[in-house]
Amino acid sequence: MKLKHLSLSLIAACGLATPAFADVPNTTPDNATCVPGNPTSSDNYKAVKWYRDSAERVAQYNQTFSIGQEKIAKKVKKDKLKKGQWGVIFDIDDTVLDNSQYEKDHVYSCEHFTPTTFYAFTESEISTATPGSVKLTCSIQKMGGKVVFVTNRDGTFDSKVQQATVDNLKAVGLCFDSVVFSNGEKDSNKTPRFMSIAAGNYESIIATNKQLKPMKVIAYFGDNIQDFPNIKQSQAIKESPDSSFYDKFGQEYFSLPNPRYGSWEANQFN
């Protein structure tokens, strides 16, 4: 079934699996009253405006990355972790790379996400670094850790997506040791890839550097609840906000704000 005309909520209602690109831009069609050239008529206008134009968003990214760096440094010192034997995993889209230009264009045009247009955008290599991401990724390497980006960008989509992703990451100054892609559009669960990275087993995954040795992964950063090990949106939303389920957040897991798209779109509106 083609996904380009299905919203995440409709996918959930039909009992279909969340698409592999659930952590890349919006799969929800714009409203029928959207007028091309009039961004305020788009359902996604305020969310995109907040992401692109609010001081709060800049503050929250810097705040999250700063706390993350502090926690990582303490963990390395406390556990006496040796250089090259530990690492940190980051999501890419709207965690370390800002793709909001893609959505701004769609707010103006009233178009919506399709894999074809999104990968054309990624291959243009114009995404910018998110606030604080360059400083953090490079600091991790200076502390002796490995930086691995795990993305649900489909590494099999075409012959350009992998190299374009790497080139964009390098162009904005991000420091990293490997990029791990999804292996087809149905490969949406990142946890098996997390496990492969920790074990140093790259035989079954798409990675730009398959020479990395096993490592102790001490932190994860993402803008989607499913960027963290063994967590599904449908499970997490049922947990009490004060439960131990969220204890790792702010300690080992670091979540960034994204009001524009994500696995949360399939949740019931309360």
Image (cartoon, rainbow, N blue to C red):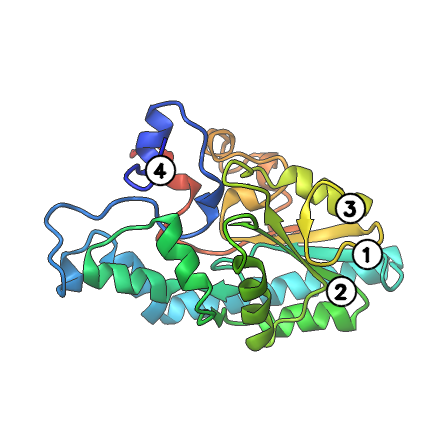
Element carrying mark 1: loop
Of label 2 and label 3, which has the lower sequence position?
2
> Which residue is denoted by mark 2 in the rendering?
73
Of labels 3 and 4, the one closer to you: 4
> Which residue is denoted by mark 4 in the rendering?
3
Q: In this view of the protein, can residue 38 be seen by the observer?
A: yes
Say left or right for 211 vs 68. Answer: right
Residue at the far top: name it. 15
Q: Are marks 2 and 3 in contact (CB under 8 Å)?
A: no
Of labels 2 and 3, the one closer to you: 3
In the rendered image, residue 192, in percent from the top left (x then y), is placed at 67, 37
> Which residue is denoted by mark 1 in the rendering?
211
Q: Mark 4: few, some, or many residues within 10 Å (few <14, many ≥20)?
A: few
Q: Mark 1: few, some, or many residues within 10 Å (few <14, many ≥20)?
A: few
Between residues 153 and 59, which one lies in front from this camera angle?
153
Of label 2 and label 4, which has the lower sequence position?
4
C-alpha gap between disc 2 and disc 3: 19 Å
Image quadrant assignment for residue 165: bottom right
C-alpha gap between disc 1 and disc 4: 35 Å
Element carrying mark 4: loop
Name the mark on residue 188: none
Of label 2 and label 1, which has the lower sequence position?
2
Between residues 119 and 264, which one lies in front from this camera angle?
119
Of label 1 and label 4, which has the lower sequence position?
4
Of labels 2 and 4, the one closer to you: 4
Element carrying mark 3: helix
Q: Are marks 2 and 1 in contact (CB under 8 Å)?
A: no
